[in-house]
Amino acid sequence: MKRVGGHVSTAGGIANALKNTTLIDGNCLQIFAGSPRSWARKLYADEEVSAYLKEATKLDYTPTFIHALYLVNLATDNPDLLQKSIDSLIIDLTNGRSISSAGVIVHLGSHQGRGFSAVVDQTADVIKQIINSTEKTPFVIENSSGQKGKIGSIVEIGELFAKVKHPRLKLCLDSAHLFEAGYDLRNPSVIDTLVNELTGKKLLDHLVCLHLNDSKTDFDSRNDQHANLGDGQIGLAGLSNFVNHPSFAHLPLILETPGDLGFPDAKQIALAKSL
């Protein structure tokens, strides 16, 4: 069975994410384990976890991914920000283990103009520290859209994997980010080139998830703005090229599209399933 779902709300309790997944006709999901723009984090209560696991098993909704908050920056030179980033990810990964999450998906942050080479060792060391402070749940790096200073190109991710060398380090590819960073998914040969690049950097076997989003901004824009599937610059044909490539076709799809009300809806999920 193809796994397709969206980023859904946990308002009122984490089990409500499963209800929201049912409403959009998904069978996998992504959630925030707290506010995406606040450092406030707490561990899930045992009764919440039990209810979630029971219902997820009953519905056969799997995998569940947790998306880390947007404030995280593992490359910062600000000690307070770095420690808050570490602490929040440890809580997210611990919560992920509780609900048998397939991983916590992380935007690594920005080198703030210092260049990747100046921060690569720190970033790798911090990832190791976080992984070694937690158990089981994968730490999943998401590619960036190429914004100035943001870490997350395929080259940079490859360097980090080579330095961290841990089986719990995984990769998520976002279609909009790839397109905005210069991979024209409308051209099937470009996807072949991407797969060859991932293979050469020993990343392909670590892929666990695809974020399926169209791009509101132009090809190679370096500007991260998601659009509904088919309404953006990639288009349905390009998105179909991406998700149906033999190297990617087995992966779960998570939508982060705006839908009609600001979140993925049943129409978007149906479109994704039709690709």
Image: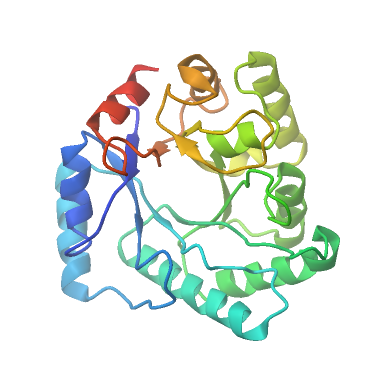
Q: Nearer the viewer, residue 161 or 38?
A: 38
**Residue 57 appearing in the image:** no
| Quadrant, the N terminus | top left
| Quadrant, the C terminus | top left
Looking at the image, which residue is at 26% across and 54% down? 9
Q: Residue furthest bottom?
A: 80
Q: Position of residue 251 (x, y in %)?
A: 46, 33
Looking at the image, which residue is at 69% across and 29% down? 194
Left or right of 225, for residue 28: left
Q: Position of residue 136 (x, y in %)?
A: 46, 63
Q: Nearer the viewer, residue 249 or 6?
A: 6
Q: Position of residue 95 (x, y in %)?
A: 36, 68
Vertically, is 55 above or below 181? below
Q: Nearer the viewer, residue 260 or 256?
A: 260
**Residue 11 appearing in the image:** yes
Q: How many callouts does the rendering have? A: 0
Vertically, is 274 above or below 59? above
Looking at the image, which residue is at 31% across and 35% down? 259
- Give the colouring mode of the picture: rainbow
Vertically, is 69 above or below 26? below
Q: Quadrant of residue 86?
A: bottom right
Q: Position of residue 132 (x, y in %)?
A: 58, 73
Q: Quadrant of residue 28?
A: top left
Left or right of 149, for residue 85: left
Looking at the image, which residue is at 46% across and 62% down? 68
